[in-house]
Image: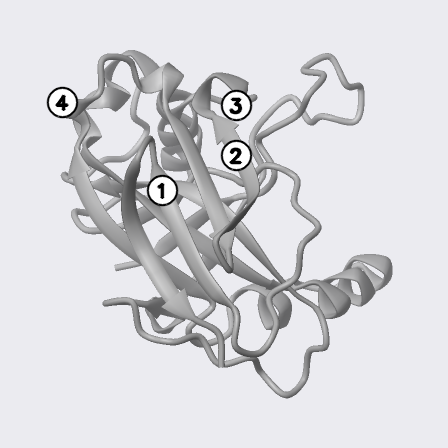
Amino acid sequence: MKIICVEGNYCKNKKDIRTPNEPIFFLKPESSLLRNNQPFFIPDYSKKIIPRVNIVLKVCRLGKNIQEKFAHLYFNEIGIGVDMEAADMLEIYKEKGLPWEPAKAFDCSSPIGNFISKKEFKSLSAISFSIFKNKKCICKAYTSEMLYSFDKIIAYVSKYVTLKDGDCIFTGSPEINDTAALNDHIECFIENRKLLAFNVK
């Protein structure tokens, strides 16, 4: 399986001229997944880890060059995950035009929670989700704020990468500046359902 991550995808002003016309995505290896609420250990090569919360889609069938109108057939479940970004490293790599993998795709950089059927939601474009640090909400967002919908993301990514059953798509994170520090407790919710919780070590 693979982890496909959309960069950004949330903007207060959807007419922002800096926003690209198509989604930007990158890949993470399976070893980046952190399951079962296991603790996240801060890597010794970063001093600034930012926990970027994402709605996650679980791919349920093989697909390539998927038309947007059929994209909804390729996922049945929705979950939540966190892209643990080594922000200090990422800034350097971006400045130098280097690949992002050391800052984004390192081992256990993708804590992922439980999944629930998409049928439980009245509208996939009106889902609220949030992340709490030590019982304080540090970010809350709605899928209505997405620049690119779930279907658009699936259609676009499948032009370049074949989707397979079990692949996880992190659909992008709202802006967040809070960092994760030693002994923090992170909790993530879709609506009022806690689907992920882990400690930072």
Residue drawn at the location 41% of the way across and 34% of the way down? 129
What's the residue type where badge 1 is placed?
Answer: Phe
- Looking at the picture, how far across and down is residue 85, in whole percent? 60, 62
Query: Looking at the image, how many numbered discs can be counted on the residues?
Result: 4
In the displayed image of the protein, which residue is found farthest to the right?
Answer: 95
Q: Tag on residue 140?
A: 2
| Quadrant showing the N terminus | bottom left
Q: Residues within 10 Å of mark 4 (few under 14, many from 20)?
A: few
What's the residue type where badge 3 is placed?
Answer: Met
Whole-number angstrom distance, CA of label 2 to CA of label 1: 9 Å
Whole-number angstrom distance, CA of label 2 to CA of label 3: 13 Å
Residue drawn at the location 44% of the way across and 75% of the way down? 40
Circle 3 is placed at which residue position? 146
* Marks 2 and 3 close (CB-CB < 8 Å): no
- Looking at the picture, how far across and down is residue 171, in whole percent? 44, 38
Circle 1 is placed at which residue position? 189
What's the residue type where badge 2 is placed?
Answer: Lys
* Marks 2 and 1 close (CB-CB < 8 Å): no
The local secondary structure at tag 4 comes to helix
Q: For this rendering, which residue is in front, 34 or 91?
A: 34
Sequence order check: which comes first, mark 3 or mark 4?
A: 4
Looking at the image, residue 34 sits to the left or right of residue 52; the answer is left
The local secondary structure at tag 1 comes to strand
Q: Residues within 10 Å of mark 2 (few under 14, many from 20)?
A: some
Q: Tag on residue 119?
A: 4
